[in-house]
Image (cartoon, grey):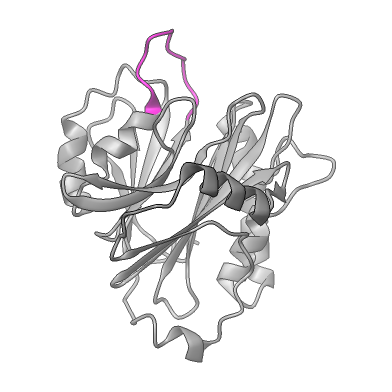
């Protein structure tokens, strides 16, 4: 029950991932972003309060990871949590190294899932029980969707919406931000900002990948409304100060806003990179 989009900036200098996480209403609110070291690699991810794992992460090797549920038969009680997959693999230095680590894991005991790994040039999609990932160029934009109602039910409407917004907006990241805030009033169960009786969108995470720079923002939401900054500050005070510092990953918790960057503002921070054939 999630939506992931991967969109290239107008000047091809950076990749942005936005991830709407949809969960059961009774599931505890996840903990904010925290820093971790996986085999010596600096990583950051939010922590699921129920399982202790995560559904999204970034590393200072310039990789981003996202986990979506998938259609298929469910496993019984006692099966391993899918949230342990990203922490086990996030120390990879490249997609090639990630493939090697993936082959060492027996994924057949997990409930169905897709693990999406993104670099500045390629997207690798790993699936339960498959030894080899599907690898494609990032291109202009890609979207991945899941729903407990059936992945096919939501993929068509959401993909079509992103295509429409990309055609209409002057900036692809503006279209992407609008996409992840969008809800059809009469079809909230199919919407990117989803709401049903039993489940809803609970957070939106942003990761930006650029040469030499990785940033990650995490925002809890309640039926499409951000949890107040004051509430989040009070929670962080109770947890105490964060004492570690990650050199290349910037951690923030704030409301996502549509970018208003000009080309002049982007150039000092990002360098040009060549991109592969567009997906759309």
Number of numbered discs visible in the structure rendering: 0
Query: Does the image show residue 64?
Result: no
Q: Does residue 260 appear left or right of residue 244 in this picture? A: right
Q: Does residue 60 appear left or right of residue 26 in this picture? A: left
Is 138 placed above or below 172 here? Answer: above
- Front residue (pair 96, 32): 32
Question: Can residue 79 be found in the magenta stretch?
Answer: yes
> Where is residue 124 drawn, in percent x and y?
32, 48
Q: Main secondary structure of the magenta part?
A: loop
- Front residue (pair 272, 20): 20
Question: Can residue 147 be found in the magenta stretch?
Answer: no
Magenta range is 70-82
The residue positioned farthest toward the bottom in the image shown: 264
Is 178 placed above or below 34 here? Answer: below
Query: Does the image show residue 241?
Result: yes
Residue drawn at point x = 30 percent, y = 19 percent: 108
- Front residue (pair 71, 68): 68
The residue positioned farthest toward the top in the image shown: 77
């Amino acid at each position: 029950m999630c939506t992931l989009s991967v969109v290239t900036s107008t000047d091809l200098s950076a990749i942005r991932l936005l991830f709407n996480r949809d969960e059961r209403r009774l599931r505890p609110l996840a903990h904010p972003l925290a820093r971790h070291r996986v085999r010596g690699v600096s990583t950051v991810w939010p922590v699921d309060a129920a399982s202790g794992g995560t559904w999204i992460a970034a590393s200072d090797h310039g990789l981003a990871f996202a986990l979506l549920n998938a259609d298929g038969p469910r496993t019984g009680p006692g099966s391993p949590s899918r949230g342990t997959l990203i922490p086990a693999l996030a120390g990879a230095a490249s997609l090639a190294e990630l493939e090697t680590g993936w082959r060492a894991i027996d994924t057949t005991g997990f409930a169905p899932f897709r693990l999406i790994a993104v670099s500045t040039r390629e997207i690798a999609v790993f699936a339960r029980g498959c030894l080899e990932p599907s690898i494609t160029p990032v291109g202009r934009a890609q979207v991945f969707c899941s729903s407990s109602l059936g992945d096919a039910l939501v993929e068509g409407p959401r993909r079509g919406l992103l295509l429409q917004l990309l055609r209409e907006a002057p900036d692809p990241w503006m279209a992407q931000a609008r996409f992840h805030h969008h809800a059809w009033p009469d079809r909230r169960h199919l919407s990117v900002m989803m709401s049903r009786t039993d489940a809803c969108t609970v957070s939106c995470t942003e990761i930006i990948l650029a040469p030499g720079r990785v940033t990650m923002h995490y925002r809890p939401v309640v039926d499409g409304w951000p949890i107040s900054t004051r509430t989040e500050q009070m929670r962080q005070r109770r947890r105490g100060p964060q004492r570690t510092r990650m050199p290349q990953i910037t951690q923030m918790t704030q409301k996502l806003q549509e970018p208003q960057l000009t080309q002049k503002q982007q150039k000092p921070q990002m360098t040009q990179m060549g991109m592969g054939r567009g997906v759309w």
